[in-house]
Amino acid sequence: MFCRNCGKELTGTPEICLGCGAKPLVGSSFCHACGAETNPLAEICIKCGVRLAKAEVVGRRWMPTAAGILSIIAGAIGLLVGVVVAAVGEIVGEAEGIFWFGAIGAPFIGLGIVAIIGGVFALRRRIWGLALAGAICSLCFPPYSWFLAIPAIVFVALSKREFV
């Protein structure tokens, strides 16, 4: 195996090339099979005929971070709304004689907690499904959190490969 960035021969499958410090498949200047120089746009090495490995996607690392922050903010809004609805519902319910009226805030509190947990997992780039579920749960607090939740869902969905 050869580094696609500097062309140095590598033993085994190292994470980092000792010659240039880059990940071995990040570059596009050399063939990973024979080490020959290649055109960055080429899909097949002219010297050995092997299909060239595509360069790893670089530049999407900000998406899970942004999605996590947006989900946490939307979840905090939902949690706050749930607490306020539960408190006001309890007061109104007590005055009207409907004692379970404060329980209306419980789903908002639950969805807010799931959105916050999903945001934390998005920030850590762990468990893509939970991060997506958190972003979707942050959508459940209309209309003020939609501006946060929709980009969070899109960012989590587009950055699936960033998750471990």
Image: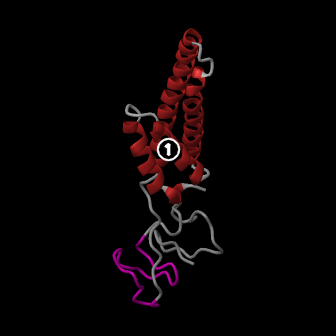
Decide which of 74, 50 is in the foreground and name it. Answer: 74
According to the picture, the residue beneath numbered tag 1 turns out to be 135
Q: Nearer the viewer, residue 79 or 10?
A: 79
Tell me how many marks there are: 1
Please tell me whether the stretch drawn in magenta is mainly helix, strand or loop.
Answer: loop
Q: Is residue 104 shown in magenta?
A: no
Which image quadrant: the C terminus?
bottom right
* Position of residue 88 measured from the top left corner of the image (x, y, whole percent): 53, 15
Instruction: Residue 21 in the image: state x and y as whole percent.
Output: 53, 60
Q: Is residue 87 above or below residue 34?
A: above
Residue density around tag 1, few if under 14, some if 14–19, many if 20 or more, within 10 Å: many
Q: Vertical placement of 11 versus 134: above or below?
A: below
> Residue 45 occupies which quadrant of the picture?
bottom left
Residue 72 location (% of width, % of height): 51, 35
- Asked whether residue 42 is drawn in magenta, I would say yes
- In-front residue for pair 164/129: 129
Can you say whether 143 is above or below 118 in the image? above
Q: Residue at x 41, y 54 (%)?
A: 59
Q: What's the amino acid at mark 1?
A: Ala
* Residue closest to the far front: 97
Depth order, front residue of 147/90? 90
Q: Residue at x 36, y 80 (%)?
A: 42
**Coloration mode:** secondary structure
Question: From which residue to which does the magenta span run?
Answer: 28-49
Q: Quadrant of residue 55?
A: bottom left
Quadrant position of the N terminus in the picture:
bottom right
Query: At x 56% / y 36%, what residue is drawn?
Result: 111
Regarding mark 1 in the picture, which secondary structure is present there?
A: helix
Q: Among all residues in the image, which is located at the extreme right?
A: 12
Q: Position of residue 153 (x, y in %)?
A: 45, 48
